[in-house]
Amino acid sequence: MNIAVLSGKGGTGKTLVSVNLAAAAGKSTYIDCDVEEPNGHLFFKPEQIESEKISVKIPLIDDALCNGCRKCVDFCKFNALAYVGSKVLLFDVMCHSCGGCSLLCPQKAISEIDKNVGEIQKGVSEDVTVVTGIMNTGEASGVPIIKNLLEYIPSSNESVFIDCPPGSACIVMESIKDADYCVLVAEPTLFGVHNLNMVYNLVKLFGKPHGVVLNKCLEGDNPSEKFCIENRIKILGRIPFDNELGTLNSNALIVARESDKYRAIFTSLLETVTKEVQHETAVNS
Amino acid sequence: MKQLLILSGKGGTGKTTMASAFIKFAQAKVFADCDVDAPNLHLVMNQSVEPIRSDYYGLPKAEINPDLCVNCGLCMQHCRFDSIIEDDGYTIDYYACEGCGVCEAVCPAGAISLNPAIAGELMLYKNDSVFSTAELKMGSGTSGMLVSEVKKQMKEAAGDADFAIIDGSPGIGCPVIASISGVDMVLIVAEPSVSGISDMERIISTAAKFQTRAIVCINKYDTNIVNSEKIEAFCKSNNLPFAGKIPFDSEAVKAVNKGLSIADVDCASGRAAREVFERTFEIMFPITN
Ligand code: SF4
Ligand code: SF4
């Protein structure tokens, strides 16, 4: 059972929900795909860390062989190459590693070398396997790291919780590819509804079964709840706005491990999600 | 024109809340929302006019003409993005295609063409002020280029304004790199949580890579005083100017839900934001005589 946790934006409690669901599930895997700002490991504080460096291919130009035909420069759709002072220069952050320039160079002056863009760390925290992708600062895209991260999904049928990057861009689509179910986390504000609407459209576009967790619920109107009711989106649970929870969480503690009260909230949320997933599999089989 | 960019390393820290307050305090005539993945600024910057809309074309996407295709499979062999699907002939996975053009270049039958694809929409509000924003279409990947377009559109419409305030994009990836380029200063909105500190450090190092001056403020500082003190100490030991701290304020949530900024209502967070604003502007526009 692969469960992706999404939100239109950061800060809505995506990490709170995914970390605590994994903790409540017991033996499970937590994968942090928010490679620009991975935070899950700050909560789990995993041990026995093994790490794997992630690299992409970038071109290496042999000036001695290059005759200045500029075929590569003309080809590169991402403006990663320029011909300056009788030399081809590479702007490596712009390079998408498509391999086109080396393929097309008539002089065979371009080869490819590895460039490190980040790493993946795997460790354990109690019975949760914690896998974190970390993108180096100054890099443009985390997609290569996410592709590698998803290989860490175990083949056993244990539960996997995928903490997705915020937003609805390509990087999020990559992260939900293998998900059986999507949990959307929403805040009770006008911004919250706007952001929820975006991820809601995304999961619909990809035909992923989904439900919403309302986070930071205050007394009074909840525009996100209204949105769910109007669009007949399943509300999976509500997490109250609560100072104690807020403090535990801001100190990077796993609330489900700290108190029975919070453990109960996430255990019941997990049960609801599990039921939904089973229901979906039954309907679709 | 000097440009102040507001960043946070992550969304949800109150970046847009701060940006909208700054725009009001400064009576800014020029502003922009560079969070093209999930723009929010327009929700609290009510505009009296309809925006001028224009389509934004991202990178083109490949398309295979089945009549010309001779099923050699070369395109699939060379596509690094796994965007060619083989199933009763070859087709392109629109969302996976990055428009690099390798398939077009290797196809011996000339069956592949790269066609322009609409990846989003730019919006420009022009009344007594200029407000540039955009929204990326679902699943489009090239948000960095759209961010550059938002800034370009802003600059072209700005006239002789002295300064602009830009609500940045979350994260540290390509949209953020695109929003930092060319700005004079970055205001980093940090949250006093362990995650918030980690995000802040990553965005500070990103700004430093692009040699852009940074100033820090803390939002919702009273939700964790100990961590707030850590952030202040961090700034001190790294010689980063500190602009102040804003309390958690349920009035702020109420204001936002009414489509107002915290500068429009009398509230604790609004008062604190004004001080942050004044300190930021003092540093951005030093008195030089
Ligand atoms: S590999 Fe592709 S993106 Fe990178 S420089 Fe060569 S042509 Fe450009
Ligand atoms: S390379 Fe061209 S001819 Fe060959 S399979 Fe691809 S589209 Fe068809």
Image (cartoon, coloured by chain):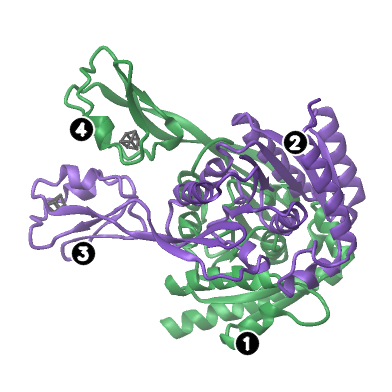
Chain colours: A green, B purple
| Residue B90 visible to the viewer | yes
Left or right: A98 with respect to B18?
A: left
Vertical arrangement, residue A232 with respect to residue B211, above or below: below
Label 1 Cα neighbours within 10 Å, binned few <14 / some 14-19 / many ≥20: few
Q: Amino acid at mark 3?
A: Asp
Return the chain for callout 4: A
Can you tell which mark lies on residue A104?
4
Q: Is the C-beta separation of discs 3 and 1 under 8 Å?
A: no
Where residue B124 sits: x, y (%)? 51, 60
Can you tell which mark lies on residue B285?
2
Q: Under 8 Å from ligand 2: the CB of mark 3?
A: no
Dividing the image into 4 quarters, which one contains the N terminus of chain A?
A: bottom right
Left or right: A248 with respect to B140?
A: right
Return the chain for callout 3: B
Question: Label 3, on which residue?
Answer: B87
Q: Amino acid at mark 1?
A: Ile
Question: Label 1, on which residue?
Answer: A229
Instruction: Give the camera-side residue of B5 and B46.
Output: B46
| Same subunit, tags 3 and 1 | no
Vertical arrangement, residue A155 with respect to residue B208, above or below: below
Distance CA(mark 3)–CA(mark 1): 40 Å
